[in-house]
Image: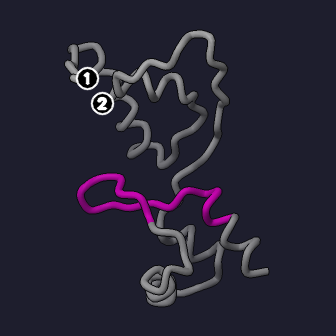
Amino acid sequence: MGTTTSAGNKYNLIRFLWLVVRKGCLGEFSLARVNRLFHRQPPRSQKLATYTTRLLRLPEVMRRVSLSKATIYRLMLLGKFPRPRKIECRAVGWFEDEIDDFLARIR
């Protein structure tokens, strides 16, 4: 599947990524919009769900799980804690629902 990117699609993708980085969350978005930004348009007849999630930075994750930074990274190496997603070159964040799932699993 060859992908060609028009100027409008580049602008939408940049705007979407700016919102993720600047606001610290994805906010409400539909899978149809994300697919459109990445040039994979779903069939019009397909109904897509809308998801709401946020990206949490390390201080917020530490507060929620009551663990230190070292313990979080140690648990990640053991595969017992969710891995972060790269936001930009020197910033990462965890999806809020993955952290909530982790908390539910350990309680």
Q: State the extent of the magenta-drawn residues as a range.
A: 84-100
Which of the two residues, 64 or 7, is positioned nearer the viewer here? 7
Q: Is residue 75 above or below residue 46?
A: below
Residue 89 drawn in magenta: yes
Q: Position of residue 24 (x, y in %)?
A: 47, 49
The quadrant of the picture occupied by the N terminus is top left
Q: Is residue 14 above or below residue 59?
A: above
Q: Is residue 94 above or below residue 13?
A: below
Residue at mark 2 to residue at mark 1: CA–CA distance: 6 Å
CB within 8 Å, label 2 to label 1: yes
Q: Position of residue 2 (x, y in %)?
A: 21, 23
Question: Residue shown at 56%/70% (left/top)?
Answer: 61
| Pointer 2 residue | 14
| Pointer 1 residue | 10
Q: Position of residue 59 (x, y in %)?
A: 51, 71
Seen as rendered, the residue at the extreme right is 107
Seen as rendered, the residue at the extreme front is 1
Q: Position of residue 46 (x, y in %)?
A: 62, 18
Which of the two residues, 87 or 42, is positioned nearer the viewer here? 42
Residue 29 drawn in magenta: no
- Displayed quadrant of residue 14: top left
Question: Residue shown at 35%/53% (left/top)?
Answer: 87
